[in-house]
Image: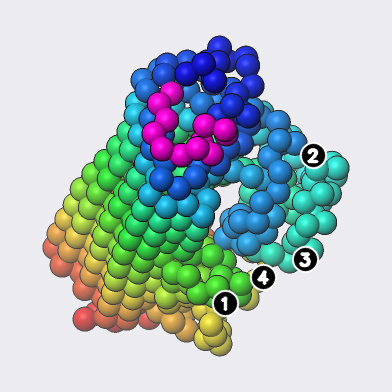
């Protein structure tokens, strides 16, 4: 391996890319390899041996624009650090680490928020703004679209198929951490994903507009949602019509994230045929989390959450069609029925079974559809939802919603649901265990 220098100082960008361009099997031994953004080609097996770290240089100027999706919207954003693009038959394996050197990126986000920056100011930001006309009206999730500081994903798989990523550690991401996009037959197995809890928008795994995905035995400790499924945002995502479908999430552990297993909030093309089972979600804000709102669109259906264990969450079960982030249109949060359009999200055929939650701090759960399009055919069975009776957490922090009245207790909140089945569901630690608020019908 004379091509690479693992001293943590030498820039290996060119040498590493030359190796990756050749394809085949590449073994990187122990060492600290500094690099800029890189791309992996088809028919490549990259082995990061124990003690090997690819550490990405935190210089925004190195990450030239690429056309991708950023928070669910197609645009020119910064080149992902580690990029598998238009490739097939790729294996990334070993016991090594991919490190995004995230701290300088996070500090820049914090500084922009502290001074209230809401438009491009630097030359780099103006460069991206010029490439993205109309960005001012694009939907976003709070990551920085208004100022066009479009940070890179750490590990993105785009327009690719037959990809296996196993056993490595992926950490300190500038933005979303592992992001499969427009791809199929993806397996993520045995990964360890780590970002500080206060690091902004550092989701663990975001599967977006993909099919045939397996996420097995992964451990996720991050500063936003843990494992999230998405399919684009708003009218553009609806037109693209590339759903996320046929996903298995099994044997995973998520700690200190905003959500454990998450559907949304970018739901435009739909998300379906999902099974989440035998997972542990500890100290996450939410455990099971389904979030969307008017304007996001998409059919969410045939979702199964089975045998999940949750401890010390704010709220273990959240179905929230009034998700507030990134929207200032008050009609999205009206309690009056609105016109049903292609931008109205729908949710049906959902099963939550064999799940156990202990010590929930805000509430036992909330399931809230839309008045004009309620959640349909939802079953919750054989579940124990325990609330910490000593908690002083604000009950309204359960789901990051807007427009809904404050609930009367920390029980399981039900609103705008058709054909609901509750079977052997035990709520403890609060009065008014089941809150039936408005327009709920039982199967």
Q: Nearer the viewer, mark 4 or mark 3?
A: 3
Residue, disc 3: 134
Q: Are marks 1 and 2 in contact (CB under 8 Å)?
A: no
Element type at mark 4:
loop
Q: Nearer the viewer, mark 2 or mark 3?
A: 3
Residue, disc 1: 239
Element type at mark 1:
helix
Residue extending furthest toward the top: 7
Front-most of 189 and 350? 189
Residue 435 seen in the figure: no
- Compared to residue 114, the image places residue 409 above or below, namely below
Q: Nearer the N terminus, badge 4 or badge 3?
A: 3
> Percent from the top left, x then y, of residue 134?
77, 66
Q: Quadrant of residue 403?
A: bottom right
At horizontal 63% and vertical 62% (from top left) the residue drawn is 74
Q: Is residue 8 left or right of residue 211?
A: right
At horizontal 85% and vertical 42% (from top left) the residue drawn is 123
Residue, disc 2: 115
> Percent from the top left, x then y, of residue 329?
67, 70
Magenta stretch: give its range. Answer: 17-28
Q: Nearer the viewer, mark 1 or mark 4?
A: 1
Q: Nearer the N terminus, badge 2 or badge 4?
A: 2
Q: Nearer the viewer, mark 1 or mark 3?
A: 1
- Compared to residue 356, the image places residue 199 above or below, namely above
Residue, disc 4: 329
Q: Quadrant of residue 309?
A: top left
Distance in Å between CA atoms under marks 1 and 3: 17 Å
Q: Nearer the N terminus, badge 2 or badge 3?
A: 2
Q: Is 72 colored magenta in this rendering?
A: no
Q: Is residue 108 left or right of residue 312?
A: right
């Amino acid at each position: 391996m004379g091509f690479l220098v693992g001293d943590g100082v030498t820039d290996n960008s060119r040498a590493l890319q030359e190796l990756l361009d050749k394809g085949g099997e590449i073994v990187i031994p122990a060492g600290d390899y500094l690099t800029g953004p890189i791309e992996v080609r088809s028919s490549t097996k990259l082995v990061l041996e124990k003690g090997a770290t690819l550490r990405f240089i935190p210089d925004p100027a190195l990450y030239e624009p690429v056309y991708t999706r950023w928070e669910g919207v197609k645009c020119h954003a910064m080149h992902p650090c580690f990029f598998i693009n238009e490739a097939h038959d790729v294996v990334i394996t070993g016991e090594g680490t991919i490190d995004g050197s995230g701290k300088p990126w996070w500090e820049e986000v914090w500084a922009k928020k502290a001074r209230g920056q809401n438009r491009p100011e630097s030359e780099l930001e103006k460069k991206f703004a010029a490439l993205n006309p109309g960005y001012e009206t694009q939907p976003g999730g709070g990551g920085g679209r208004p100022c066009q500081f479009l940070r890179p994903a750490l590990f993105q798989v785009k327009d690719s198929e037959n990809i296996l990523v196993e056993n490595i550690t992926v950490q300190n991401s500038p933005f979303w951490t592992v992001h499969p996009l427009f791809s199929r037959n993806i397996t993520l197995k045995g990964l360890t994903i780590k970002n500080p809890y206060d690091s902004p928008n550092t989701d663990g795994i975001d599967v977006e507009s993909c099919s045939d995905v397996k996420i097995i035995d992964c451990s996720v400790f991050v500063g936003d949602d843990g494992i999230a499924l998405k399919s684009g945002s708003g009218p553009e995502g609806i037109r693209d019509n590339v759903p996320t479908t046929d996903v298995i999430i099994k044997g995973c552990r998520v700690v200190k994230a905003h959500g454990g297993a998450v559907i949304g909030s970018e739901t435009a093309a739909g998300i379906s045929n999902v099974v989440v089972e035998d997972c542990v979600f500890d100290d996450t804000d939410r455990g099971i989390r389904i979030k969307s709102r008017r304007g996001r669109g998409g059919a969410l259906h045939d979702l199964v959450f089975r045998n999940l264990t949750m401890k010390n969450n704010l709220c273990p079960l959240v179905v929230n069609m009034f998700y507030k982030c990134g929207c200032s249109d008050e009609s999205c949060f009206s309690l009056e029925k609105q016109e049903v359009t292609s931008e109205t999200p729908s949710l049906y055929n959902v099963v939550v079974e064999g799940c156990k939650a202990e010590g929930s701090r805000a509430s036992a759960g909330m399931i809230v559809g839309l008045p004009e399009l309620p959640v349909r055919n939802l079953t919750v069975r054989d579940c124990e939802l325990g609330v910490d009776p000593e908690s002083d957490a604000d009950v309204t922090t359960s789901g990051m919603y807007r427009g809904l009245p404050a609930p009367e207790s920390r029980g399981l909140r039900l609103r705008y649901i058709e054909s609901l089945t509750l079977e052997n569901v035990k709520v403890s630690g609060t009065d008014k265990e089941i809150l039936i608020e408005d327009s709920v019908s039982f199967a």
